[in-house]
Amino acid sequence: MIKNLSSLLLIYTGGTIGMKVDPADGALKPFDFSQILSEVPEILKFACKIDVHSYNPLIDSSDVETGLWVSLVELIKENYDKYDGFVILHGTDTMAYTASAVSFMLENLSKAVVFTGSQLPIGVPRTDGRENLISAIEIASAHDENGHSIVPEVSIFFAGTLVRANRATKINAEEFSAFRSYNYPPLATAGVKIRYNHPAIHSVYDWGYGLEVSTKLDTRVSILKIHPAITESVARNVLLAEGCRAVIIETYGSGNAPSKGWFISLVQEAIAKGKIIVNKTQCLGGSVDMNIYEGGRLLLASGVVSAGDTTTEATLAKLFYLMGLYEDNDMVTKAMAKSLRGELS
Ligand code: ASP
């Protein structure tokens, strides 16, 4: 049987959900959280106690830095024993990056951490924020008869669907249904009832394990998107950039890139200089398989690592996390091949 837990921490970082039009210049800007609560009095009807932690300053999530990620996991760690679940309000633009990073930075998580936000501010009559917030609270507070969370992992709730955080991508700038998980099924759908997809939800190995957090991130990563007519100098500038320890190459289809000599030589030069090169397909669904075509085989033979079916957001966050953990690139590349938090099939 699913019940609601007794206490929840609602963390507000900013984003459209809490924005209002600033009459001075007409731009949407974040406002005080107390206004959100007054817009959604339904929250007070929940049987559980909800405390609010509001960031100051509130940000548009396009300004997010890893400092916010560190602060979020520290906040969850500090409050872990006090609350049964966590809801994080965050802008949609970078929600998949932040939520992916938080999923890696929290180890042995056995409580729900649900990210949500909205496409329209909560004060607007047609807002999607009210339904997103209310359902996120219900999911974060859902538990079984033993008091165990129903969704003990980091997830994103948006427009009636709950997806694993590190499988999510923002795919629409206008529609309410803004997030998709192409390579992993939804964890829950919210209609008249919230239907949990129990087989897809992370199962906790031992509920007694304590939460561990990792706050050391190495952000020396960059992304090179392959496109027709890409030039050698552009590819060189990214692949061999000073101060960059890893490069994610966004390739075509099943992981294909130009088989031209100059491109493969650049990749080999970057690897010889100690860089980690990761192959991530530009396709939203499906996986990298470097064994199929010549362009992929050349990358594989050069020592390029596959991102498999992991999203770009999660690949970036996984690299930040693993490079923060390990100085040794071999340790990083070995761990990239494993699914650490359900990000890889
Ligand atoms: N620019 C906003 C943000 O990401 C968009 C949103 O929240 O939907 O903070």
Image (tube, grey):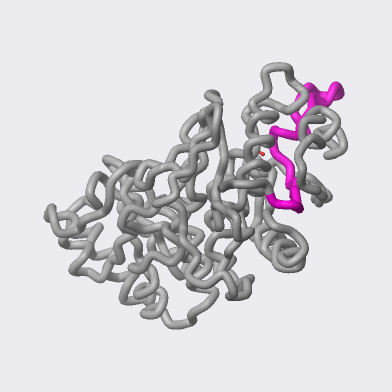
- 99 on left or right of 333: right
- Which one is in front, 73 or 198? 198
Query: In the rendered image of this protein, does residue 174 appear above or below residue 289?
Result: above
Q: Is residue 113 visible?
A: yes
How many dots with numbers?
0
Q: Where is residue 234 shown, x and y percent of the image?
A: 38, 51
Q: Where is residue 221 shown, x and y percent of the image?
A: 48, 62
- 149 on left or right of 297: right
Question: Residue furthest toward the top?
Answer: 125
- The residue at 29%/49% (across/down) is 251
Query: In the rendered image of this protein, does residue 245 appear above or below residue 21?
Result: below
- Which one is in front, 206 or 242? 206
Decide whether residue 200 is among the magenta residues: no
The image quarter containing residue 136 is: top right
Quadrant position of the C terminus in the picture: bottom left
Query: In the rendered image of this protein, does residue 325 appear above or below residue 186?
Result: below
Residues drawn in magenta: 5-30
The image quarter containing residue 43 is: top right
- The residue at 50%/65% (across/down) is 204
Q: Where is residue 307 shown, x and y percent of the image?
A: 34, 59
- Which one is in front, 190 or 6? 6
The image quarter containing residue 106 is: bottom right
- The residue at 20%/58% (across/down) is 290
Image quarter for ligand 1 equals: top right
- The residue at 41%/74% (across/down) is 332
Q: Where is residue 246 shown, x and y percent of the image?
A: 43, 66
Decide whether residue 17 is among the magenta residues: yes
Q: Is residue 238 visible?
A: no
- 183 on left or right of 167: left
